């Protein structure tokens, strides 16, 4: 068949303005547009402005369509296009295609997360013939620092901590060349014009380089690590402490000096082959290790070689990451062993970013420091991910992930600008703006004064970076959370309405929103299992079955409320929870009569149980809590895995999970799983998870000296069975729901998550869970923001004027 002759009218000439929104600044977007436009012989220009990138183009309609199609299908590696809008415009454009200066104004674009060194830059720093051979701050538009150095938008060199480093002639040529991958790479530099790394002693004495095998200061730092020294390293988002992970005495010394008794250390290795000696990893884990986010990846420690127990006491996993900056690539070039690469701070304090503070606080830990003269504008911790239930899941969202925006689910397009203040532990905050959520990097635990100060500073910074002026605020119900108190103060000062959101409803909403559950979708059953959160009835919750959507929730079921003797002390000391559970189930006399021969009885009797009994009798500082987390603590204490004191939050549960016998878990019949029943609470009639049968079976296993790993496996299986039984009971016939959302910190336990999710799928329920947003309290702010947005959209007067705080 003969082709139809082409007519000029089939492909008319057009003047088109193309608006690109999303993460499109500082990621090589303009040079990509320039290169595509030149290839297509289009006329026009491209610029950054406060809304993103603006392209003006003149040419055939087919070629303009090809430009847009290429941007959509093959954007720069770090770009994230949210929307492309086009309109015709009147006017003339200069011949050729040009990149023009940025236009400042109200920010409607995104700041890119820091990105791991790209392959091209990594090859350069290792190439003896390259201009940037062994330059530790090499980067381009496809990689390098972003959030850690930015102070304002648009993202230009003048608004970053690279402003004090004028470009040399060679770097300037690259910066101005649209064909170069360093075109407008705001952090680009080289040996001549950029930041310098240097090795110092914190005590001010001279470093005698002749004592070390070295190519430069970075290489000398490695020589010190290989000789058993602890070295402070000024990294991308804060100081780190490094030592040889294979030397037990050095690891023990670091633990003692850092005052980090048991919390696992993060590890860094130069390549995958080194990691494979200690951990077996699958393709998902390999991809995460090699990704531009370059997080710490938790993997089973089942490789052919073993590291000292002090690296991760009581754990069966190790947290490895690959070098994410040229400095770390060069540092580990000659290192065939893993190194500890932990945050530069004392235990529980925020990571240090200031050089003077590092000298003061890290000097007693690390005699030597590898530092540089580029300021860190914003503290950013390493992110942590783990493969669970067939997907990589973020446990701590920070470097590489934040502050990447997330699109809101269908139905939220008209949501007002909101600020959600988050929780107390693992705190984050969240902005809602123009149909997107911006969740901050991990802030930490706000009870630490320095962490709270940093949280407060970031709360002031983000509105500047995103030109965000909230019309509504959201916070937790708990009156003693520092985040809630700050939200209340801000609401008063700025005359803004404050919506206080129930903790577990926020967990549920975060899971729904991450899974793009539409605003008007039917409610789901949200199973939210964590440590503690203030309930809507004024009591402490922590094991909840909620029929929930974004607007509202109904509490359908719960875990058995059990006293927490000593309140906060019970969170830190697992034996208190064990004592309270045993008293609640069988009483001290019944326990003594049946189980006095157990070493566990003697261990509890040695504690001040008489005092606790008096507290319980007078109801003095013994709040009731329906907490799954405290049940895990009690079982960990009973098995002896974590009896006296938790060295860090969640240690008891983590040790219990790590101890699980895989053979028992996978091959032993469900009939030996510990039984938990589903009776109803007196008064409310609410169904609850009753652990009496579990305790009787567990104590019986202790009598016959069943190993702790078998007990742990039977507990996990029994708990998962009880949870699914509760779901079936609550669903009813006909079913009230067909979808179940899993949230809360207890679902960062891989065994529990996989057992519950698998059993629910067998029962034909759709299961929603977290992947991009942490299931723990790091996701609370996101959920608060979504609930507040839904309520504002449903209540027009909230959108129109400020009012009094409302729940």
Image (spheres, rainbow, N blue to C red):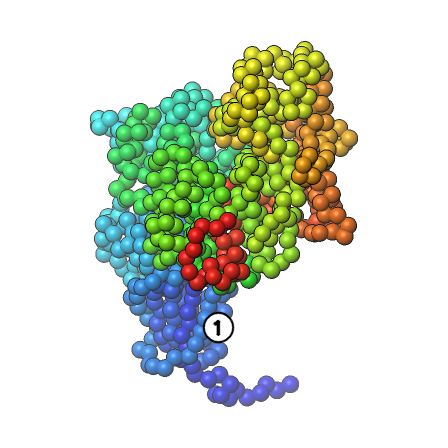
The quadrant holding residue 530 is: top right
Residue closest to the eye, 507 or 195: 507
Relative to 446, is 766 above or below? below
The quadrant holding residue 315 is: top right
Percent position of residue 736, x then y:
71, 51
Percent position of residue 221, x then y:
33, 32
Percent position of residue 714, x then y:
69, 29
Residue closest to the eye, 408 or 535: 535
Q: Is residue 652 visible?
A: no
State left or right for residue 320 relative to residue 704.
left
Residue closest to the eye, 319 or 460: 460
Relative to 381, is 637 above or below? above
Residue identified by numbered label 1: 66
Q: Is residue 558 visible?
A: yes
Tell me which residue sits at (24%, 50%) in the image. Answer: 165
Tell me which residue sits at (34%, 36%) in the image. Answer: 450
State left or right for residue 702 relative to residue 201.
right
Tell me which residue sits at (74%, 51%) in the image. Answer: 735
Instruction: Specify few, some or many for label 1: CA neighbours under 10 Å numbering under 14, 14-19, or 20 or more.
Output: some
Per the image, label 1 sits on a secondary structure element best described as helix
State left or right for residue 325 relative to residue 553.
left
Q: Quadrant of the N terminus?
A: bottom right
Relative to 165, is 317 above or below? above
Relative to 297, is 231 above or below? above
């Amino acid at each position: 068949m003969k082709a139809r002759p082409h007519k000029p009218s089939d492909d008319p000439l057009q003047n088109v303005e193309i608006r690109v929104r999303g993460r499109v600044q500082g990621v090589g977007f303009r040079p990509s547009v320039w290169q595509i436009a030149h290839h297509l012989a289009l006329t026009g220009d491209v610029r950054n402005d406060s809304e993103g990138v603006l392209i003006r183009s003149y040419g055939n309609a087919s070629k303009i369509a090809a430009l847009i199609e290429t941007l959509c299908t093959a954007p720069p590696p770090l770009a994230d296009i949210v929307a492309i809008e086009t309109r015709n415009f009147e006017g003339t454009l200069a011949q050729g295609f040009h990149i023009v200066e940025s236009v400042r104004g109200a920010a409607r674009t995104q700041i890119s997360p820091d990105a791991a060194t790209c392959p091209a830059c990594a090859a350069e720093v290792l190439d003896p013939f390259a201009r940037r051979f062994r330059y530790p701050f090499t980067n381009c538009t496809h990689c390098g620092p972003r959030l850690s150095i930015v102070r304002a938008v648009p993202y230009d060199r003048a608004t970053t901590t690279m402003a004090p480093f004028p470009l040399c002639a060679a770097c300037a040529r690259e910066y101005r060349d649209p064909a170069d991958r360093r075109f407008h790479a705001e952090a680009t530099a080289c040996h001549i014009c950029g930041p310098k790394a240097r090795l110092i002693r914190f005590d001010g004495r001279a470093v005698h380089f002749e004592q070390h095998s070295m190519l430069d200061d970075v290489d000398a730092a490695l020589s010190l690590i290989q000789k058993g020294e602890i070295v402070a390293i000024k990294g991308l988002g804060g100081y780190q402490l490094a030592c040889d992970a294979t030397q037990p005495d050095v690891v023990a010394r670091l633990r003692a000096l850092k005052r980090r008794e048991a919390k696992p250390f993060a590890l860094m290795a130069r390549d995958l082959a080194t990691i494979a000696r200690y951990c077996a990893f699958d393709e998902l884990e390999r991809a995460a290790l090699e990704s531009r986010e370059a997080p710490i990846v938790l993997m089973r420690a089942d490789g052919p070689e073993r590291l000292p127990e002090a690296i991760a006491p009581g754990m069966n996993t190790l947290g490895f990451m690959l070098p994410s900056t040229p400095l770390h690539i060069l540092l580990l070039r000659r290192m065939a062993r893993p190194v500890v690469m932990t945050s530069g701070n004392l235990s529980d304090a925020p990571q240090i970013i200031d050089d003077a503070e590092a000298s003061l606080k890290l000097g007693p830990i690390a005699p030597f420091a590898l530092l540089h003269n580029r300021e860190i504008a914003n503290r950013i911790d390493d992110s942590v991910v783990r493969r669970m239930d067939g997907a990589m899941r973020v446990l701590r969202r920070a470097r590489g992930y934040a502050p990447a925006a997330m699109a809101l689910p269908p139905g939220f397009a008209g949501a007002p600008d909101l600020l959600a203040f988050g929780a107390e532990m693992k705190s984050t905050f969240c902005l809602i703006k123009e149909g997107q959520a911006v969740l901050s990097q991990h802030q930490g635990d706000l009870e630490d004064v320095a962490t709270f100060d940093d949280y407060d500073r970031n709360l002031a910074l983000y509105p500047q970076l995103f030109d965000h002026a909230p019309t509504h605020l959201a916070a937790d119900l708990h009156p003693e959370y520092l985040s809630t108190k700050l939200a209340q103060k801000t609401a008063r000062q700025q005359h803004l309405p404050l919506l206080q959101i129930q903790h577990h409803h926020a967990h549920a909403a975060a899971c729904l929103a991450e899974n793009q559950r539409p605003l008007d979708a039917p409610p789901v059953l949200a199973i939210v299992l964590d440590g503690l959160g203030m309930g809507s009835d004024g009591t402490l919750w922590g094991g909840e079955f909620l029929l929930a959507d974004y607007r509202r929730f109904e509490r359908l079921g719960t875990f058995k409320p059990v006293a927490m003797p000593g309140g906060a002390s019970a969170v830190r000391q697992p034996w208190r929870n064990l004592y309270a559970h045993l008293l609640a189930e069988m009483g001290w006399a019944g326990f003594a009569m049946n189980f006095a021969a157990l070493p566990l009885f003697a261990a509890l009797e040695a504690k001040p149980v008489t005092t606790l009994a008096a507290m319980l009798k007078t109801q003095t500082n013994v709040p009731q809590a329906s907490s799954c987390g405290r049940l895990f603590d009690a079982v960990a204490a009973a098995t002896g895995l974590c009896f006296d004191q938790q060295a860090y939050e969640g240690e008891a549960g983590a040790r219990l999970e790590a101890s699980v016998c895989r053979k028992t878990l996978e091959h032993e019949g469900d009939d030996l799983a510990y039984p938990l029943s589903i009776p109803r609470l007196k008064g409310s009639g609410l169904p609850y998870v009753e652990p009496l049968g579990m305790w009787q079976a567990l104590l019986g296993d202790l009598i016959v000296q069943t190993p702790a790993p078998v007990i742990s496996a039977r507990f996990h299986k029994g708990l998962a069975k009880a949870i699914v039984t509760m779901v079936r009971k609550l669903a009813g016939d006909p079913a009230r729901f067909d979808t179940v959302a899993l949230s809360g910190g207890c679902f960062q336990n891989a065994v529990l998550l996989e057992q519950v999710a698998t059993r629910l799928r067998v029962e034909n329920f759709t299961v929603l869970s977290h992947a991009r947003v942490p299931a723990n309290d790091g996701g609370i702010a996101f959920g608060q923001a979504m609930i507040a947005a839904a309520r504002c959209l449903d209540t027009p007067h909230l959108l129109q004027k400020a009012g009094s705080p409302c729940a």
